[in-house]
Amino acid sequence: MPGQTALPTPHILTPLLPRKSSVTFATSSTKIPISVTEPSLPMPEPARVKVVIAGGGIGGLALAIMLEAAKNIDYIILERSTAHKTLGSTIALNACALRMLEQLGMLPDIRKISKPIGGFNLRNDDLSPIGHIDFTFGERQYGYAGFVMSRPALFDLLRSRVPEEKILLQKQVSNVIETPSEVRVVCADGSEYSGDILVGADGAYSTVREIVYKNLSAQGKLPATDSKPMELTHVVVLGVSEPMDPVKYPRLMDHFSTFEMTLFRDKPLSVWLSPIHDNRISWCFGGEIDSASKTEAWGWGNQTDMKSILPEIRNLPTEYGASVGEVLESTSKDMVSSVFLEDKFFETWNTKRIVLLGDSCHKVLPFAGQGSIHAMLDGISLTNLLADLKSTSPKAIEQVLKTHVQKRHQPGRYAVFGSRLFGRFIESKGFAARWVRKILLLVLPQWLVIQIFNRTMRDRPLLSFLPPVKERGVAVSWSN
């Protein structure tokens, strides 16, 4: 593989272990059992597997760390950017991914860059309360609290765990060629990289997916739903403040991070804030795109137009002591971004040697914090199968990818649907929507809330080839 040197694995001779079996000799009057020792065949060693990862974002880096822990897998990351970094506000991780991260020895570092999530407070723009969602039961119930952190902080942590030589920058994928013996990736600069498997972890607008779908469409094998573009649903401005004065704003030192959401009653606008590590506040404001025109509902065409919304939110107070305006003013320009949000579940995830991962196959809205978590769950499933692979024959590779997709397809679908449903629950307007929120937030008993969370939070898989971590929590994991 260009850019990567795969060292040959020395062949280790495994001694034949004795196996006892019983053979019976019969005479005319008796049967005499005689024990005979037979040699047994050694267990086959896992095959050496070469993996090419397209995309060095959160999902690609997390997968690389898992592959690094497996001793039989060589990999390389092809990242299209010139500077390997990320923007964005926050990422939340829960027990579904944290159990695996603890297994990799990363949980202490996760704690250092994050705050445990206490819950969500919802209010109207006139500051009247709507309700509260409590998440403090997470550690007792599942063994781990949910953690919120800045996206760049998590990115930097994951990046530090991947050897520098395994990440190649300025490698924009331009073509993919599958043959019976390998998959070749051609980059825009003319370089080529080959492997047994290509993982498309290159995000919502995946080039790998585009190439695969183009080929399948030409063969008449692409489902009609996969040929439709993603639906843009929201436009938001988001960022992370610089460290703020904890003496002036003492709530920033609270143990738990409580998300605060302000919902405007007469327009598709909401403001989200959450304290994170190092006395910073993550923030986001935005709303739904007009469903008829598919254009910005507020007339936000650019950064200048977006300033028109600031007077309406600048003076909003927060639970942390600062106004929204003070939080925005304490944010440097390079930590602010304007993005469109979309969601879609793609039916087609794989070919014989190519598989999609994370947002490239199940793009979720960020409301329920499921994107990065499900990318990591995809990675766990795929890595476990590759670590146990006994052959890299075309049939074996194809079967591994089929097995992986069969396992992860339905959870990915549920993640997209769940994030969409949570977004509608939070942001829908009108009398009926307001009453639904009040009933669910004020009437629903906590025990029932926990039972609802149990349906997803008990899926806390581990890497099968590493020593397991101790099971914690009342709701025992049904994974591994």
Image (cartoon, rainbow, N blue to C red):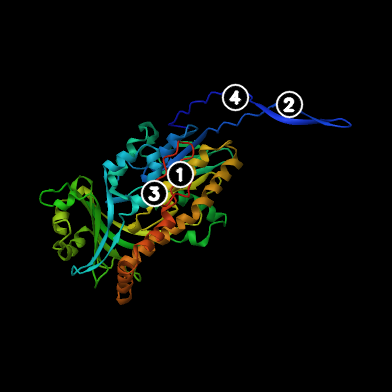
Which SS class for mark 2?
Answer: strand
> Of the residues under marks 1 and 4, which one precedes in the sequence?
4
Q: Sequence order check: which comes first, mark 2 or mark 4?
A: 4
Q: Nearer the viewer, mark 4 or mark 3?
A: 3
Question: How far apart are labels 3 and 1 at the CA level?
Answer: 21 Å
Q: Position of residue 177 (x, y in %)?
A: 52, 43
Q: Which residue is mark 3?
A: 473
Label number found at residue 36: 2
**In the image, what residue type sits under mark 4?**
Thr
Q: Which residue is mark 1?
A: 380
Residue 343 lies left or right of residue 7; in this view the side is left
Q: Which mark is residue 14?
A: 4
Cα separation between marks 2 and 4: 22 Å
State if disc 3 and disc 4 touch (CB < 8 Å).
no
Is disc 2 surrounded by few (<14), some (14 to 19) or many (20+) residues within 10 Å? few
Q: Gap between marks 1 and 4, in whole Å?
A: 29 Å
Question: Gap between marks 4 and 3, in whole Å?
Answer: 41 Å
